[in-house]
Image (cartoon, rainbow, N blue to C red):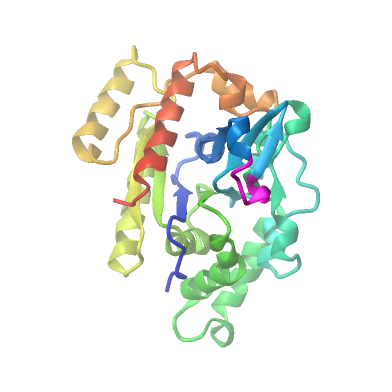
Amino acid sequence: MKPRQPKGTRIFAVVNRKGGVAKTTTAVTLAHGLSRKLMFKLQPENRVHVDDVERLFSYKGQDYFINGHVLLIDLDPQGQCAASLGIDPGNADLGQVLMGKQPLAQAVVSADRAAAGYPRPNLWLIPSSSSLERAKVELTLQAANPFSSGDDGAEAYVRRLLVRRLGLLMARFAYIIIDCPPTLDLFSRAVYQFADAAIVPVKPDYLSMEGMGKHLTDLREAQLRGIDIGIHTIVPTFFVGRQRLDRQLLAALTQTHADFLVDPIPRSQLVAEAPAHQQTLFEFDPRFRNPATIAYKNLVNKVFEDGTAA
């Protein structure tokens, strides 16, 4: 069973069976955007009424109240979330946690870069590296052993492992965003049990649409097996309105998945440049002048405001 979660906690898996559709960009931007929604400016006269000093954060003379924390979990062995946030993860590594070689507390690192001018006091990351591949191999072999996995099979074994290793996080974070790899394996299927809902970025091309279709099929099969996960949002990415194919594929998505669809994220060089400057999109374009920034802001608002799986 999925562990019981505190009221208000939301866990979203960002998934697509096709690579290169902006999964990591979407996961990082969404996580950072949600963390911003959970911070409020405090006027000096209100500060004296705040009893919980641990929720106070000061930056350049301005006081903020932190109303919750956000965790980003990098489940992709390429480990690009840390680089996208411009942070050095040190020895923190999800693969080591899953193999029981590193305590969970040591794997959760702060994404705050206030010293560089980019405060993120309530955004956290569990980074990944190539060791995650080794962990998957090792744990898949364990899962294949009936003496380890028990009578309910390898997938259930890995699912229990994720819950055992990561379940404690659910009480500490208002939102957990999981950046999933494009491959479908025991870990990806186990994530469906751990997460509340899926967010599916899809590039307007045939292969990406096919990958999305496969993932939606996977989710429906998971639902048939009694796993409680739904599709929350489908996010068209790299959209170019003047391209006929892009418009045709968006029309096809609208016809088949209108209930889950959000406004497309326009193709923008700004999105590619932000990680190179060790900034998130919202930091690189703080005045929200770029259409891609505005579209991602709308996605954040949707997830924050309705927060329930379809």
Position of residue 206 in the picture relative to residue 29 (left or right): left
Residue 126 visible, this orientation = no
Q: Nearer the viewer, residue 194 or 168?
A: 168
How many marks can you see?
Answer: 0
Q: Residue at x 62, y 63 (%)?
A: 136
Q: Does residue 81 lie above or below 228 as drawn?
A: above
Locate residue 4, reporting x and y percent: 45, 69
Residue depicted at x 62% and y 70%: 139
Give the quadrant of residue 161.
bottom right
Q: List x then y, in percent, for residue 46.
A: 58, 36
Q: Is residue 25 above or below residue 286?
A: below
Please identify the residue farthest to the left as the structure is shown: 255
Q: Tell me where residue 165 appears, x and y as whole percent.
A: 61, 68
Residue 134 within the segment the image draws in magenta = no
Instruction: Please report the residue visible at 62 percent of the width from the left and 50 percent of the height from the top.
Output: 51
x then y, percent, for residue 116:
76, 27
| Residue 227 against residue 84 in the figure, above or below | below
Which residues are the magenta region? Answer: 48-55
